[in-house]
Amino acid sequence: MVEVAGSAWSLQHQGGASALAITSSEGECYTLQPWTYAAHLAALRSCVTVSLQGATLDHAGFAEAVLAGSDVPVARQQELAAIALWWASGADEPAVNPAEAGWLDLDGTAARLQPWSEGERGQALAECLIDSDEDGAWFDAVGYLDRMTRATVQELAPPQAIDTLHAAATRRLFDATVALNVVAEEDRALLAAGPVARETALRTLRACRALGWTPSQVWAAPAVEIERLLQLMAVVERPEPAPRASASRKPRLADHPDAFVIQIEDDPS
């Protein structure tokens, strides 16, 4: 039972890709159809605006898109917008953010995930930066997210189209895709402008070259071990001292290349 705008509503959901039944305290009954990956992307395309300040979601427009396929009358749609947004976000299904590639449970479906490559990222970026007008290029953020997700999903078991995944599975998949492919905020803060960031970058790149590791592997290693490594490298890379020059003296006859030296010693007998 939830309360929305002063009215109590009962929610009944069987999980997975089943519909959501909502009933008012007066006995009004409505049904929200399963919200799929394809429907989610389509709604985002019309409700997300991207600017230099970031992405903005038109919540009212998105809720209207969710309710468009239901039997909720127009007079009730504004009141039920919060329930529609909750439904499209996956209801109460827990989010899962894997830090590594592998299999992800999508509530009835399993997805094998692999971070996308730099080549795939570059291709997606080229396809989603669109010259629109004299104000510059327009970035298709929703298309970029879609390309990233499809490149990350290597396999679905049992086999099915990504477009048919239900809302909870879609949210988990998006969360996992971003976790695998986008630099985390704490990493961005670590590499923010300033002398500390430069020192961190230099240390990280030196360790990467020495170990053949990625930056994430270096950052996950014990700090004391990385410090030992860098100190050892500093010892090896330190230039050896130049040989000391002998004291200057006047050349002697024995120093001449054609000289024949006869050494006379006392007879010990």
Image: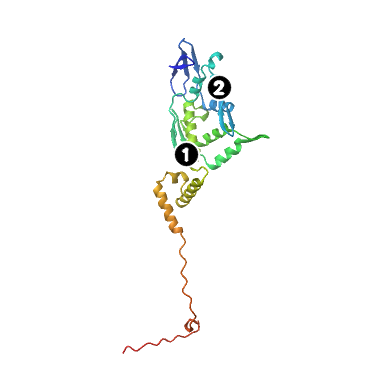
Q: Secondary structure at mark 1?
A: helix
Q: Nearer the viewer, residue 89 or 159?
A: 89
Percent x, y of residue 4? 48, 17
Q: Secondary structure at mark 2?
A: helix
125 versus 196 height, above or below: above
Question: Within 10 Å of the Cα at label 1, are there few (<14), some (14-19), or many (20+) other Cα atoms?
Answer: few
Of badges 2 and 1, nearer the viewer stands: 1
Amino acid type of the residue that numbered disc 1 sits on in the rendered structure = Glu
Amino acid type of the residue that numbered disc 2 sits on in the rendered structure = Ala
- Could you tell me if the residues under marks 2 and 1 are in contact, i.e. CB atoms within 8 Å? no
At horizontal 47% and vertical 26% (from top left) the residue drawn is 168
Question: Image quadrant of residue 99?
Answer: top left
Q: Nearer the viewer, residue 132 or 185?
A: 185
Instruction: Tell me if I can see residue 148 in this picture.
Output: yes
Q: Is residue 54 left or right of residue 260?
A: right
Report which residue position mark 2 lands on.
60
Report which residue position mark 1 lands on.
186
Question: Within 10 Å of the Cα at label 2, are there few (<14), some (14-19), or many (20+) other Cα atoms?
Answer: some
At horizontal 40% and vertical 52% (from top left) the residue drawn is 228
Extreme-right residue of the structure: 134
At horizontal 44% and vertical 55% (from top left) the residue drawn is 233
Instruction: Tell me if I can see residue 166 in this picture.
Output: no
Percent x, y of residue 199? 48, 48
Extreme-left residue of the structure: 269
Percent x, y of residue 8? 45, 14
How much space separates mark 2 and mark 1, taking CA atoms? 32 Å
At horizontal 51% and vertical 30% (from top left) the residue drawn is 162
Q: Quadrant of the N terminus?
A: top left
